[in-house]
Each structure stands twice: as structure tokens, then as C-alpha cells.
Image (spheres, rainbow, N blue to C red):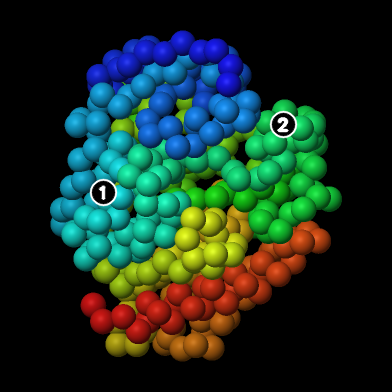
């Protein structure tokens, strides 16, 4: 781990006051950056691996009381950025009104990590691609822009098949973010230029031509809260995760489904897919197949096929479209059978 300076901030305002809005001077991705430290469950790993090389850390742990409130109202669910994953997963209102949120958190990481990790940190976690995390591999456009991508012809079993490019096929590793984007969530952000709100759909960027640029956050911006609007679909919801082992493993494929079912007809549906895309992924294609139709297993299968119709596979992950489609069908059937 390289040398860095450290300071502690007692509030979101104090934390942002220690940063700059100049590109590169306060940016999570760049060497020499000033970076916010919350739970540290991702950042410290990357620093130890010499993937992340910040010049300064601003510890926002002292702002926990200000930034960790979990509030469920008739309008929606507001979660403080520093709320622990375990606290949200165990919250009574979340489990009752947003079961897909609770399940995605309960299936993530380990109990110890869930007790440490913050919600905003979890949302911003970076890929688990071994070519990104192991600096002995020279070609990684996320780590060294313009160097290439060793995963294209390497071991790519865990890599993405949607929202990838010839520049990068890394998959987004998280669970909750796929739920967050499916439920039309948004983040409240504070930065050197003031406050703003970013829709979950607009927060993360696909790999495209600039894989190293992963979010639309500006230099110096800090997420202060996450918000999910309520709706008739949120109670009838579930998260299904397929992985190599039952605990402490990232998804090969996963599906988040929230459905408004009226008289057997799908009035509305929200679908997020995990383990298969370069960013948290909402499947508009699958939703379009289902919306307004009488639900059936055959319809669910057509939705699964639609979700992966544009998949781009590599040597070792060619199984993912079929597995992903079956995972979505399983989630849809589970949600359809719920009593709410």
C-alpha cells in the first residue's frame, strides 16, 4: 500500500469541503485523488492490491449519525449513504414493503462485511475482474486506459455479456444496484458545486470507449442518500441469485423482479439483471414482453429470451445467456406465486 494522507470529517459538508471540483484532484478513479472512506470494504482492498492509489483519504465515518437514517414513508424508502447493508437488510419496513431490496443485501458478501459496508459504498463497488485487480496483467483499460483488455481472450467465465464493448467485458459485481436501477431509484449527491439528484439509471456508465470512467459523479461529489419510490409493484418482489457456492460468492447470474399483478395480468413490472452486464442492468426488453399480458410460464420464458437477445459472449461465458434467462424465469415465477 502506498503512502497517503488521512483526515476525518464529521459531516457531509465538511467532507466535501476538503475536496476540489477540478478533474483528477478529487476523483475516485484517478491516481493522486482525494477519496472518501466509508466502510472501506472495497477501497482498502484495491489500495492493498495497488489498483487504487489515492493521495488522500477523507474518513466520513464520523458522519454516520447524519447519513445513516433508514426512513420508509408512503412516498418511498430513503436510505442514508452510510447506513450499513445489514441494517437495511434487517429493517422491518424494508422486508415488508421492499423484499427484493432486503434479499439482495442478505445474499451479498458475508455477515461480517455486511456489518461494515455502507450502502453508497456497495453501490459504487468496482468490478471483480481478475485482470483489473491483478496489476501483473498489463492490459486493462479500466486500470490503465488505452492499454487493451486481457479478458477478451483470457479466462472470462465471470465476465459480462450485456453492456460490454471491445474495450472492456468486465461485469458489475453487486447485487443491490441491479435492484436499485430496476426500482427507479436515485441518489442525492453533495459536491463542491452544491447538491443534485442522479437517477440510478444514469449513475453508472457502460464500458463503451472509456471503461475507466464508471459513473457520472463529478470530482468531489459525495453520495448522501439513496431513494426508492414506492409503488404497487414493490411488495410483490424478489431477488434470485445463482452462484458457484451458496455464501460469499458473486453472481453468475441474478434477477430482481418487482411486479404489479392485477387479475392475473401484468399491469407493471420492473426487472434488473446481475452478473451479466458491464453496469447495473435494467431489462426494458423483458419488461416490454410482460407488461399488459396475462402471466404464464410461457410468457416468462419469452421475457427471458428477450432479455438476452443482444448478448455478446466469449469463450468461457457462452453459458450466461441461457442461465440468465432461466434465472429470470425462476424469479418471475416466484414473484407471481407470492401472496401480498
| Residue marked by disc 1 | 87
- Up/down of 182 relative to 297, above or below: above
Q: Quadrant of residue 225?
A: top left
Q: Quick one: label 1, few (<14), some, or many (20+) residues within 10 Å?
A: some
- Given residues 123 and 1, the one toward you in this image is 1
Image coords of residue 77 (percent x, y): 24, 51
Q: Is residue 150 left or right of residue 78?
A: right
| Residue shown at 57% from the left, 37% from the top | 214
The circle drawn on residue 27 is: none
- Up/down of 206 relative to 50, above or below: below
- Say if residue 154 shows up in the picture: yes
Q: Quadrant of residue 258?
A: bottom left
- Given residues 171 and 294, the one toward you in this image is 171
- Up/down of 281 relative to 303, above or below: above
Looking at marks 2 and 1 on the same chain, the residue that comes earlier in the sequence is marked by 1
Q: Is residue 279 left or right of residue 79?
A: right
Q: How many marks overall?
A: 2
| Residue shown at 41% from the left, 26% from the top | 37
User: Which image quarter holds the N terminus?
Assistant: top right
Image coords of residue 75 (percent x, y): 19, 54
| Residue marked by disc 2 | 135
Q: Secondary structure at mark 2?
A: loop
Compute the Cα span from label 2 to label 1: 35 Å
- Given residues 178 and 43, the one toward you in this image is 43
Q: Quick one: label 2, few (<14), some, or many (20+) residues within 10 Å?
A: some
Amino acid at each position: 500500500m502506498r503512502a497517503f494522507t488521512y483526515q476525518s470529517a464529521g459531516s457531509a459538508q465538511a467532507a466535501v469541503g476538503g475536496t476540489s471540483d477540478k478533474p483528477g484532484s478529487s476523483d475516485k478513479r484517478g491516481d493522486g485523488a482525494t477519496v472518501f472512506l466509508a466502510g472501506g470494504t472495497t477501497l482498502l482492498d484495491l489500495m492493498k492490491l495497488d489498483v487504487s492509489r489515492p493521495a488522500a483519504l477523507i474518513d466520513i465515518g464520523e458522519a454516520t449519525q447524519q447519513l445513516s437514517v433508514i426512513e420508509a414513508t408512503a412516498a418511498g424508502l430513503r436510505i442514508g449513504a452510510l447506513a450499513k447493508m445489514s441494517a437495511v437488510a434487517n429493517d422491518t419496513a424494508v422486508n415488508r414493503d421492499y423484499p427484493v431490496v432486503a434479499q439482495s443485501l442478505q445474499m451479498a458478501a458475508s455477515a461480517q462485511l455486511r456489518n461494515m459496508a455502507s450502502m453508497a459504498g456497495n453501490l459504487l463497488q468496482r468490478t471483480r475482474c481478475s485482470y483489473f485487480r491483478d496489476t501483473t496483467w498489463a492490459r486493462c483499460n479500466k486500470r490503465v486506459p488505452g492499454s487493451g483488455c486481457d479478458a477478451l481472450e483470457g479466462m472470462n467465465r465471470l465476465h459480462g455479456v450485456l453492456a460490454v464493448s471491445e474495450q472492456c467485458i468486465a461485469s458489475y459485481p453487486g447485487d443491490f444496484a441491479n435492484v436499485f436501477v430496476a426500482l427507479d431509484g436515485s441518489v442525492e449527491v453533495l459536491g463542491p458545486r452544491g447538491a443534485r439528484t442522479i437517477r440510478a439509471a444514469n449513475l453508472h456508465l457502460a464500458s463503451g470507449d472509456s471503461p475507466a470512467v464508471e459513473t457520472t459523479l463529478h470530482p468531489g461529489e459525495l453520495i448522501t442518500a439513496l431513494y426508492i419510490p414506492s409503488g404497487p409493484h414493490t411488495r410483490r418482489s424478489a431477488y434470485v441469485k445463482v452462484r458457484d457456492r451458496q455464501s460469499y460468492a458473486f453472481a453468475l447470474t441474478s434477477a430482481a423482479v418487482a411486479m404489479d399483478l392485477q387479475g392475473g395480468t401484468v399491469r407493471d413490472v420492473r426487472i434488473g439483471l446481475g452478473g451479466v452486464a458491464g453496469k447495473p442492468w435494467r431489462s426494458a426488453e423483458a419488461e416490454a414482453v410482460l407488461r399488459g399480458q396475462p402471466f404464464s410460464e410461457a410468457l416468462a420464458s419469452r421475457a427471458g429470451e428477450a432479455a438476452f437477445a443482444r448478448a455478446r459472449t466469449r469463450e468461457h461465458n457462452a453459458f450466461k445467456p441461457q442461465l440468465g434467462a432461466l434465472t429470470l424465469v425462476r424469479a418471475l415465477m416466484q414473484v407471481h406465486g407470492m401472496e401480498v
